[in-house]
Image: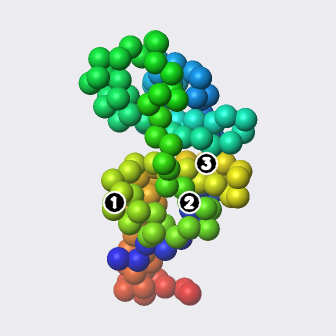
Amino acid sequence: MDVSGTIEAILGQKGTEIFSVSPDATVFEAVELMANKNVGALLVVENDRLVGMISERDYTRKVMLRGKKSRETQVREIMSSDLTVITPREPVENCLRMMTDKRIRHLPVLDGDTIRGVISIGDLVKWVIATQSAAIQHLEMYISGGYTG
């Protein structure tokens, strides 16, 4: 399967809006922001530097199941800090492999120390579907004699 393209192309379509939270915020505030923005994870940023990520999975496994209180627990207590990050030049295929192998759903995109965005597994699946649809349409035109290129 041809999964061409880079993360830069996906960010170009998706946009680079970033939702983040401070490590000092409460888990309740983080979950509330995720719900309001309809996202499954937030970057944890301190002094314009990526220090971690908090996801719905972190909440369920590290707060809810352990009986902690989300209004009293700080993000820094449950965030994931050993992150896999990518650059905008990373091929889509590599990201799909990384996410599958590491069982992660979100990849922060960094250009040096600058945060460029976040790519989700859903973003990658959407890209693959669009790429395949374009290839199918191109082949159908070729087969039917409508090919002009």
Quadrant in the rendering for residue 23? top right
* Vertical placement of residue 48 versus 123, above or below: above
Q: Nearer the viewer, mark 1 or mark 3?
A: 1
Tell which circle, 3 or 2, labels the residue nearer the N-terminal end: 2
Q: Which residue is mark 1?
A: 100
Q: On the rendered image, what quadrant is the N terminus found in?
A: bottom left
Label 3: which secondary element = strand
Label 1: which secondary element = helix
Name the residue at 67% across, 34% down. Answer: 46
**Rendered location of residue 107, percent (x, y):** 50, 52
Amino acid type, residue under disc 1 in the picture = Thr
Name the residue at 35% across, 17% down. Answer: 68
Query: Cα distance, mark 3 to mark 2?
Result: 10 Å
Query: Cα distance, mark 2 to mark 1?
Result: 15 Å
Q: Residue furthest left?
A: 65
Determine crowd level at label 2: few under 14, some 14-19, many 20+ residues with C-alpha closer than 10 A: many
**Rendered location of residue 111, percent (x, y):** 68, 58
**Rendered location of residue 14, percent (x, y):** 57, 50
Name the residue at 48% across, 48% down. Answer: 82
Q: Which residue is mark 2?
A: 86
Determine crowd level at label 3: few under 14, some 14-19, many 20+ residues with C-alpha closer than 10 A: many
Tell me if residue 32 can be seen: no
Q: Which residue is mark 3?
A: 117
